Image (tube, rainbow, N blue to C red):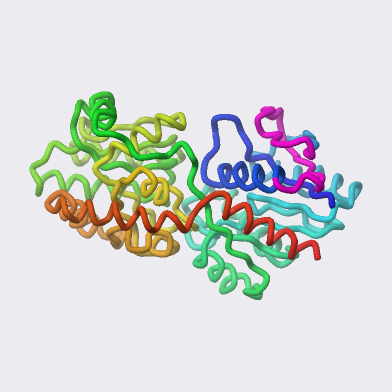
Amino acid sequence: MQIVVNTRLLLKDKLEGMGWFAYQTLKHITTHNPNVHFVFVFDRNFDSDFIFADNITPLILSPQARHPFLYYAWFQHSVKGLLNKMKPDLFLSPDGFLSLGAKCKQLPVIHDINFLHHPKDSKWLTAEYYNFYFPKFAKQATRIATVSEYSKYDIVKNYGINEEKIDVVYNGINSFFRPLDELTKQQTKEKYTAGKNYFINVGSLHPRKNIVNLVRAFSIFKKESNSDFKLVLAGPDYWGVSDIHKIIKETNLNDDVIFTGRLKDEELNLVLGSAFALTFVPYYEGFGIPLVEAMQTETPIITSNVTSLPEVAGEAALLVNPLDAYEIKNAMLELFQKPELRESLINKGKIQKEKFSWEKSGNLLWESVLKATQ
């Protein structure tokens, strides 16, 4: 069997949600299927760490696909030409993009369709491109994988896809996340927040992450609790970050909100594991990887009561309406006032996290591959 894989999101030191999914699941399926030949297709020079086994042949195709016009050039010309020449058993695309009309079976991982529900969260041309092409990708796909039951039925409902064509492959938890001892927690607090307790949001500062409303809720919490808590925003900037700075200035929180930027893996574990609680309140999410990372570090969770988040959080979080700053604030205040509630959420997280592992994810994706190639 020969499988061509879109690996353009495997970028050294720049892995985020979809990138981690690609990295972990591809590492699993390539090393566990030595008799299958995988062709990894990159759009730029790649790091040798991404060539997980001897049964992988890497190729570089231009142009670099980081813009709608270049998406089209790469997938509809460069990749399509390769697929029609090689005629593989399958084209596997962990970021959901396909080559329309290519003469082979194709399996996209469509993580979510936020761009349909919230097009203004993306740049105009990107949203237009996604909303034009992803329904076509879904219809052409031999099978589809996605990362939650919520995303599965969102695709079924909005794209008219038979639910039997879609496989749910949950995300896993990276091995560098682990609980911390009290001394390490205190040292981490000294480094980032002058020793103060803090709430944390993990992930890129994308508009859909609802950071503006989180800051607004934190401002109200500060006034009502009269506490010296800080809010740490751990992740790289995204377009629209100016709105976050604006609300921080309006609420006089300049000294209480800390931006860490992108953190290396071990540092992210320290910052998340030392937090008083994860406050992850996006208004749309296909999965929500920070939830399971918090469970692994034994950090209690406040998260949204919409889309996939209740499914992933289970009973291990306080669920809030992400559009209601007062409801987010109330959850913060409840955790602040009830130590026993924090312990309860941590213990429930230890149970809930057992549902998620990259080994399970890799096995489920491989099952989807086998269904697609039958």
Instruction: Return the x and y of residue 108 as percentages of the image width and height.
Output: 68, 56
In the image, residue 141 sits, relative to residue 126, either above or below, namely below
The one of 150 and 211 positioned closer to us in this rendering: 150
Count of marks, rendered view? 0
The one of 212 and 171 positioned closer to us in this rendering: 171
The one of 172 and 109 positioned closer to us in this rendering: 172
- What residue range appears in magenta? 32-56
* Outermost residue, right side: 85
Instruction: Return the x and y of residue 241 as percentages of the image width and height.
Output: 39, 39
Question: Most prominent secondary structure in the magenta stretch?
Answer: loop
Q: Is residue 16 left or right of residue 178?
A: right
Q: Is residue 3 magenta?
A: no
Q: Is residue 37 magenta?
A: yes
The residue positioned 73% from the left and 36% from the top of the image is 53
Q: Is residue 157 left or right of residue 371?
A: left
Give the quarter of the image for residue 236. top left
Quarter of the rendering occupied by the C terminus: bottom right
In the image, residue 260 sits, relative to residue 133, either above or below, namely above
Instruction: Return the x and y of residue 285 as percentages of the image width and height.
Output: 46, 57
The residue positioned 27% from the left and 55% from the top of the image is 345
The residue positioned 17% from the left and 38% from the top of the image is 229
The residue positioned 15% from the left and 49% from the top of the image is 336
Instruction: Return the x and y of residue 39 as percentages of the image width and height.
Output: 79, 42
Give the quarter of the image for residue 354. bottom left
